[in-house]
Image (spheres, rainbow, N blue to C red):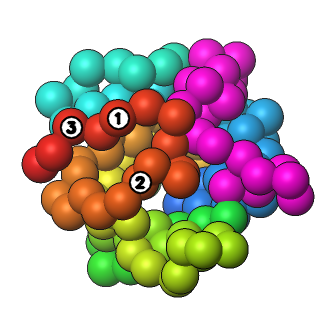
Amino acid sequence: MPAVDARQAIEALIFDYADRIDRGDFAAVGALFADGTVAGPDGTPFARGQAAVQLLYERTTRRYEDGTPRTKHVTTNLRIELDLARGEAGAQSYFTVLQALPGFPLQPIVAGRYADRFAEQGGAWRFRERRMFLDLVGDVSRHLLIALPKP
């Protein structure tokens, strides 16, 4: 696969993740990690594989009447490093999560970084690992069903 196509495929995975969470489609989030892991900063896995990742998001993320968490995950500062000979890639990006609800004005609620690893299988790129780094934590009480550690 040419480098341009690989970059576009990896960008699509990263942006699909944000879209699927914001739509409250945690089965689709899980599908992104069918062969991958969602982990903390040190690599300790939170969940591995499609079913476990789906369950992780269902247990930790609040959804409202419309089925969504009423958030927008904004992903920026994307850098991708390809190793096409090995069929591997890494990516770094920033995320900011915005939320608005009745009685809760639009505001950023958390910001941090993703460190991702990808592998190509049968001509398609897949998540292998997503490490999440929390840098700034605001009021996530209306978004998460768990408490976050303060950075």
In the foreground, 96 or 125? 96
The stretch of residues the image draws in magenta is: 49-69
Q: Residues within 10 Å of mark 1 (few under 14, many from 20)?
A: few
Residue placed under numbered mark 3 in the picture: 149
Q: Quadrant of residue 132?
A: top left
Find numbered disc 1 in the image and state the secondary structure of the residue it sits on.
Answer: loop
Q: CA distance from mark 2 to mark 3?
A: 11 Å
Vertical order, 134 against 122 (above or below):
below
Type of amino acid at the residue the image marks with label 1: Ala
Mark 1 and mark 3: Cα distance apart in space: 7 Å
Indicate the position of residue 68 as horizontal and vertical percent values: 76, 56
Q: Quadrant of residue 51?
A: top right
Dot 2 or dot 3: first in sequence order is 2
Q: Residues within 10 Å of mark 2 (few under 14, many from 20)?
A: some
Q: Amino acid at mark 3?
A: Pro
Report the side of 76 relative to 142 (left or right). left
Numbered badge on residue 66: none
Is residue 30 visible to the viewer in this orientation of the structure? yes
Query: On the rendered image, what quadrant is the N terminus found in?
Result: bottom right
Q: Is residue 144 left or right of residue 32?
A: left
The reply to whether discs 1 and 3 touch (Cβ–Cβ < 8 Å) is: yes
The amino acid beneath tag 2 is Val
Please determine whether, in this image, residue 71 is positioned above or below residue 107: above
- Residue position marked by numbered label 2 in the rendering: 140
Q: Nearest the camera: 101 or 27?
A: 101
At 52% from the left and 82% from the top, the residue drawn is 106
